[in-house]
Amino acid sequence: LHLHLHLHLHLHLHLHLHLHQLLRPTKLLLMP
């Protein structure tokens, strides 16, 4: 159970990081 929670948290963090990386260039393109 603890391992599952850890995995879930890691995945969530990883996804959040990826979203940030994807949104950053878009922000730069939108804001000159």
Image: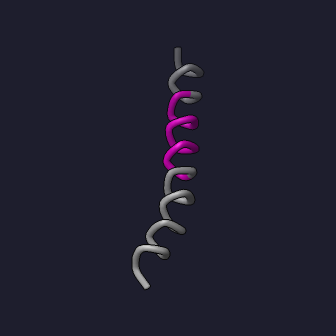
Of 28 and 9, nearer the camera is 28
Residue 27 falls in image quadrant: bottom left
Residue plotted at (59% across, 21% down): 3
Residue plotted at (50% across, 24% down): 5
User: How was the colour assigned to the protein in this rendering?
Assistant: one colour
Taking the view exactly as shown, the residue that stands out farthest to the top is: 1
Residue 16 among magenta residues: yes
Examine the rendered structure and indicate whether residue 28 appears above or below residue 14: below
Examine the rendered structure and indicate whether residue 30 appears above or below residue 14: below
Examine the rendered structure and indicate whether residue 11 appears above or below residue 26: above
Relative image position of residue 4 (x, y in whole percent): 56, 20
Examine the rendered structure and indicate whether residue 17 appears above or below residue 1: below
Relative image position of residue 28 (x, y in whole percent): 48, 76
For the record, the magenta segment spans: 8-17
Relative image position of residue 11 (x, y in whole percent): 57, 35
Residue plotted at (52% across, 28% down): 8
Taking the view exactly as shown, the residue that stands out farthest to the bottom is: 32
Taking the view exactly as shown, the residue that stands out farthest to the left is: 31
Q: Quadrant of the C terminus?
A: bottom left
Relative image position of residue 31 (x, y in whole percent): 40, 79
Residue plotted at (51% across, 34% down): 9
- The dominant secondary structure in magenta is helix
In the rendered picture of this protein, how many numbered marks are placed on residues?
A: 0
